[in-house]
C-alpha cells in the first residue's frame, strides 16, 4: 500500500498532540486548537474509523490556574499542577467533542501500568471496549501520581505503546514543526525528510535539543517513538498540528515512517516495548541465529553468560556477544538455575532428563 492508501483506509488511528501545540504563548490552553483537533477526529469517527487521542497539556493548564510562570522542577508541585490541570484539560476536550457529536472517555496511565503484564492486559481491554462502544479515548500519563523513576517522561513513548497495544494502522504525532529535518529547522539549509524507510535514513541527523518549556519531549524522543511504532507495523506521520486534517487525508505533509515490521500479539508487544527486563542472557552465535532467524526456543546450551538476578516468569533481555539486545522473553527458570544449566547440551543429561527451554519461542519477542 502507498502512504495515502494506508492512511485513508486505516481503521484505527492514534493522534498524539503535545503541550506546545495545545497552548498559547502565555501558557494558557489554545481553545481554537482544541476545537480544530476535535473537529478532525470527530470527522474520522463519523467516517466509520476508530480514532484515539493521546493528549498532553495537563501540567500546562494547571500551571496557569495556579499562577506559576515556569515549569515546576519539584515533583510534588508538578504533580499538583497536573492534578489541577487534568480536569481543566478534559473539560475543554469534552466540550469540543460534544460539539462534533463524539463521546469521549478519559484514560490515565503510568509507566508501571504498562510494565506489569496484568495491568497492561487490563489497559488493553478497557481501551478496546471504549473503541468498540464508539467512544474516543483521551489518554494521558497520570502525572499526578507517577514518580520520577516510573514515568514515560513524555507522551511520545506513550502514544507509540498505545498504537501498538491497539494494533493501530496509523499514528499521527503532532508537534510544533512540520516534520523531521536533517538539522534544527531554524538553521540555514535545513531540509525536511519526507520518508523514513529504515534506520539508515536517520543516520547523521542533528536532532539535539529538548522540548519547549511547556513540554518534555524533543525531536529525539519523537524519532525513538516513531521508529518503535513502525517496527511493530504501525505507519507514522510526524507533522505539525496545523497539518492534522491533511495528514489523516494522506496528503504529502510532514515525515512518513513506513511500517518496517508486522503487528504482533499483545504479549509480544508488551515484552518488546513495555516490560522492564530484570536480567539478561548472553547468547553464543548459534543461539542468536536459532532465536532470531529460525524461530526456535532458547536452550541452555546456547547461553554463554547470565547477568543479574531474576526468578522464573521474569522478563529478560537476550544479548549477542557484543552486548546488543536481539530479543526479549520470559524466563522459565530463575537466574541461579540458569547458571547451573548454561552451556549444557542434551547429551550432558541422562535419558529423559533434559530440561525444557530456558525461554520458549512462544514467550519470545524478536528485536533484531
Image (spheres, rainbow, N blue to C red):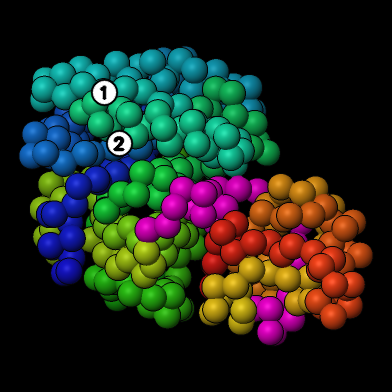
Q: Position of residue 65 (x, y in %)?
A: 41, 15
Q: In the structure shown, which secondary structural element does the residue marked by tag 2 occupy?
A: strand
Where residue 104 is drawn, which disc sits there? 1
In reply to whether residue 91 is colored magenta, the answer given is: no
Crowding at label 1, few (<14), some or many (≥20) Cα neighbours within 10 Å?
many
Instruction: Locate the N terminus by quadrant.
Output: bottom left
Camera-side residue: 213 or 221?
A: 221
Say which residue appears at 42% left-offset and 57% top-offset: 264
Up the image or down, 210 lies above or below 2; here it is: above
Where residue 53 is drawn, which disc sits there? 2
Q: Which residues are magenta?
A: 263-288
Say which residue appears at 90% left-offset and 56% top-offset: 336
Say which residue appears at 66% left-offset and 73% top-offset: 324
Q: Position of residue 25 (x, y in %)?
A: 31, 34
Q: Position of residue 359 (x, y in %)?
A: 68, 61
Whether residues under marks 1 and 2 lie with C-beta atoms below 8 angstroms apart, the answer is: yes
Q: In the structure shown, which secondary structural element does the residue marked by tag 1 occupy?
A: strand
Residue 123, visible in the rendered structure: yes
Upstream in the sequence, badge 1 or badge 2?
Answer: 2
Crowding at label 2, few (<14), some or many (≥20) Cα neighbours within 10 Å?
many
Amino acid at each position: 500500500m502507498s502512504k495515502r492508501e494506508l492512511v485513508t483506509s486505516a481503521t484505527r488511528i492514534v493522534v498524539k498532540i503535545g503541550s506546545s501545540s495545545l497552548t498559547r504563548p502565555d501558557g494558557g490552553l489554545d481553545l481554537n486548537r482544541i476545537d480544530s483537533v476535535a473537529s478532525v477526529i470527530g470527522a474520522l469517527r463519523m467516517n466509520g474509523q476508530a480514532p484515539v487521542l493521546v493528549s498532553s497539556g495537563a501540567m500546562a493548564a494547571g500551571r496557569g490556574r495556579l499562577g506559576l510562570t515556569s515549569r515546576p522542577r519539584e515533583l510534588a508541585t508538578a504533580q499538583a499542577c497536573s492534578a489541577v490541570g487534568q480536569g481543566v484539560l478534559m473539560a475543554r476536550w469534552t466540550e469540543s467533542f460534544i460539539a462534533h457529536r463524539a463521546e469521549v472517555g478519559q484514560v490515565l496511565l503510568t509507566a508501571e501500568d504498562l510494565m506489569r503484564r496484568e495491568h497492561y492486559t487490563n489497559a488493553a481491554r478497557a481501551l478496546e471496549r471504549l473503541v468498540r462502544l464508539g467512544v474516543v479515548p483521551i489518554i494521558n500519563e497520570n502525572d499526578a501520581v507517577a514518580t520520577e523513576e516510573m514515568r514515560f517522561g513524555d507522551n511520545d513513548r506513550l502514544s507509540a505503546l498505545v498504537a501498538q497495544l491497539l494494533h493501530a494502522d496509523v499514528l499521527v504525532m503532532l508537534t510544533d514543526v512540520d516534520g523531521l529535518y536533517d538539522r534544527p529547522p531554524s538553521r540555514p539549509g535545513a531540509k525536511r525528510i519526507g520518508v523514513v524507510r529504515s534506520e539508515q535514513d536517520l543516520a547523521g541527523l542533528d536532532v539535539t535539543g529538548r522540548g519547549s518549556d511547556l513540554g518534555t519531549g524533543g525531536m529525539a524522543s519523537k524519532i525513538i517513538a516513531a521508529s518503535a511504532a513502525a517496527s511493530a507495523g504501525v505507519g507514522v506521520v510526524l507533522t505539525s498540528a496545523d497539518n492534522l486534517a491533511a495528514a489523516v487525508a494522506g496528503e504529502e505533509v510532514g515525515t512518513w515512517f513506513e511500517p518496517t515490521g508486522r503487528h504482533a500479539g499483545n504479549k509480544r508487544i508488551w515484552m518488546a516495548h513495555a516490560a522492564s527486563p530484570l536480567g539478561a542472557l548472553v547468547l553464543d552465535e548459534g543461539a542468536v541465529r536459532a532465536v532470531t532467524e529460525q524461530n526456535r526456543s532458547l536452550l541452555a546450551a546456547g547461553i554463554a553468560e547470565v547477568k543479574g538476578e531474576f526468578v522464573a516468569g521474569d522478563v529478560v533481555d537476550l544479548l549477542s556477544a557484543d552486548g546488543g539486545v536481539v530479543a526479549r522473553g520470559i524466563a522459565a527458570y530463575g537466574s541461579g538455575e540458569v547458571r547451573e544449566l548454561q552451556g549444557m547440551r542434551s547429551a550432558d543429561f541422562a535419558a529423559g532428563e533434559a530440561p525444557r527451554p530456558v525461554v520458549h519461542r512462544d514467550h519470545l519477542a524478536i528485536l533484531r
